């Protein structure tokens, strides 16, 4: 059975979802308290980590295990989007430095993807144009602006123990005497690190049995040897930009609003869970403690029949009238970009905000066929949980230039941004009153490419038809 380690705001829900089909290991103390089950402090084949922006999770580890876990997470809800990453955890590239910044260098990995190499992660100087071999230390989700973080040496990451060619001897990420005990225990284990590789025990190793420590070190040693074998006959960094080897896989899973509420249901089977638990925690880092407090003092039954408290959440964290928010426009293939930042000019505590943006460029409004001029206003009405939102474009003189209705996954109104994934098909209403559905061919292409499920595509088409009729 594939072993899985889970961390982050989705841990309880994902543990509940995964523990029947997978062996959950290295469980945190709260998880051990919540589940009537034994969790070994054993090596993990796959690690599931909440992304820094709390929008989804990274699934990294053994390629077969990652594929199985990612397939399970893709079924959490209709608005789950899964994408494999060539710049996976531990992947090794022959790259080229394209730019040096204050703290590191930008490295072109393969002609399409860039990474960031901190100066502290390499020996010696790094200059523009240098060809060098780098390894991915920390992958970056496709919907973020971050580059994967790179290192100059080789490592074999693991949940219990890491091996590194840049480290000597044995050390442990544990407090005081426990670190000393782990270091001493290494001497009597039946496994050894390959020559030239340093050992670094992780904090989770403190709770592991000696047999698990031996298994973890043995597995890491095998991976280190395999990595060296892969690199022995690999092309030199001076040759073409390329991915040399990828001992692990990384897959990203973005959760939409329906997914977050489905994960609420999974968590509720184990622990008192307020409506919108994951939706609230995803919106603001400091909201976690507030959510935990509510759930600690309110009996579960008193929360079961309540709705997501949009008014309370937005009044505490935003956005309300007078705030600024960005419209963060996701794409089913994993890309994400901002449509710009606007002022919240209207706020309805029932779940709707109005955002006004001032256009700064010129051109033509997509599908509307009307001129876009500097100073135009785009007024967008966004309702939490709705599968569409309208934007009305007007000139400086107030002349209406058309309405564009974007069909998307359920809208989430976070404190500093509104997020969704665009589902391609849209509806436009031109100044002459004519109404048309557009970009249905792009939705069909996304289905063919595997970026949008047939179920989700059918939902998008039905929403577009309903909007078209209403206009």
Image (cartoon, helix red, strand yellow):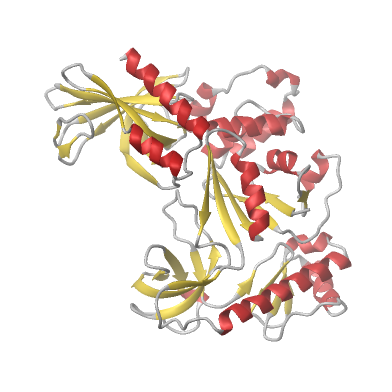
Q: Residue furthest top?
A: 470
Viewer-proximal residue among 308 and 363:
363
Left/right of residue 182 with respect to residue 109 in the rendered view: right
Q: Residue furthest front?
A: 448
Q: Residue furthest left?
A: 397
Residue 51 picture location, percent across and down: 56, 49
Q: On the image, which quarter does residue 44 sit in?
A: bottom right
- 403 versus 91 height, above or below: above
Residue 324 picture location, percent across and down: 35, 35
- 299 versus 259 height, above or below: above
Q: Using the rendered image of the protein, determine whether residue 9 is visible from the camera's viewpoint.
A: no
Q: Using the rendered image of the protein, determine whether residue 101 is visible from the camera's viewpoint.
A: yes
Viewer-proximal residue among 155 and 103:
155
- 413 versus 8 height, above or below: above
Viewer-proximal residue among 51 and 435:
435
Q: On the image, which quarter does residue 147 sit in?
A: bottom left
Q: Residue at x 51, y 22 (%)?
A: 311
Q: Residue at x 32, y 38 (%)?
A: 341
Left/right of residue 100 with respect to residue 197 in the rendered view: left
Left/right of residue 69 with respect to residue 42 in the rendered view: left
- Quadrant of image for the C terminus: top left
- 158 versus 369 height, above or below: below
Q: On the image, which quarter does residue 362 sit in?
A: top left
Residue 154 picture location, percent across and down: 59, 76
Q: Could you tell me how many numbered marks the image carries?
A: 0
Viewer-proximal residue among 192 and 119:
192
Residue 308 picture location, percent across and down: 58, 23
Q: Residue at x 45, y 23 (%)?
A: 386
């Amino acid at each position: 059975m594939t072993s899985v380690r889970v961390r982050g705001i989705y841990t309880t829900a994902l543990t509940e979802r995964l523990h029947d089909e997978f062996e959950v290991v290295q469980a945190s103390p709260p998880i051990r308290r919540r589940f009537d089950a034994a969790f070994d402090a054993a090596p993990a084949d796959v690690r599931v980590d909440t992304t820094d922006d709390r929008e989804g999770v990274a699934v990294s580890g053994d390629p077969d295990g990652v594929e199985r876990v990612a397939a399970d997470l893709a079924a959490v809800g209709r608005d789950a989007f899964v994408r494999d990453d060539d710049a996976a955890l531990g992947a090794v590239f022959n790259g080229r430095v394209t730019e040096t910044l204050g703290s590191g260098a930008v490295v072109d990995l393969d002609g399409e993807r860039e990474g960031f190499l901190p100066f502290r992660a390499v020996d010696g100087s790094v200059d523009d144009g240098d060809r060098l071999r780098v390894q991915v230390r920390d992958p970056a989700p496709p919907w973020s602006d971050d580059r994967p973080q790179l290192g100059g040496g080789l490592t074999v990451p693991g949940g219990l123990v890491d091996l590194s060619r840049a480290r000597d001897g044995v050390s442990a990420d544990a407090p005081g005497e426990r670190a000393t005990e782990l270091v001493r225990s290494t001497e009597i284990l039946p496994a050894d690190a390959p020559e030239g590789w340093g050992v670094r025990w992780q904090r989770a190793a403190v709770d592991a049995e000696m047999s698990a420590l031996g298994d973890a070190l043995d597995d890491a040693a095998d991976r280190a040897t395999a990595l060296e074998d892969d690199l022995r006959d690999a092309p030199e960094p001076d040759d073409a930009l390329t991915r040399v080897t990828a001992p692990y896989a990384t897959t990203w899973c973005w959760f939409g609003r329906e997914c977050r509420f489905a994960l609420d249901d999974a968590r509720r089977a184990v622990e008192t869970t307020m409506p919108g638990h994951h939706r609230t925690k995803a919106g603001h880092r400091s909201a976690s403690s507030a959510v935990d407090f509510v759930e600690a003092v309110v009996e579960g039954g008193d929360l079961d029949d309540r709705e997501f408290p949009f008014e309370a959440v937005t009044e505490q964290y935003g956005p309300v009238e007078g705030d600024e928010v960005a419209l963060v426009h996701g794409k089913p293939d994993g890309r994400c970009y901002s449509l710009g930042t606007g002022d919240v000019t209207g706020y309805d505590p029932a779940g709707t905000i109005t955002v006004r943006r001032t256009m700064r460029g010129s051109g033509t409004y997509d599908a509307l066929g009307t001129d876009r001029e500097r100073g135009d206003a785009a007024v967008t009405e966004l309702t939490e949980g709705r599968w569409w939102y309208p934007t009305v474009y007007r000139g400086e003189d107030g002349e209406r230039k058309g309405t564009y209705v974007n069909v998307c996954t359920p809208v989430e109104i976070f404190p500093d941004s509104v997020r969704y994934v665009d589902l391609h098909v849209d509806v436009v209403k031109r100044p002459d009153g004519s109404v048309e559905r557009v970009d249905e061919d792009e939705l069909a292409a996304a289905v063919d490419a595997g970026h949008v499920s047939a179920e989700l595509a059918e939902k998008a088409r039905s929403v577009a038809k309903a909007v078209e009729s209403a206009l």
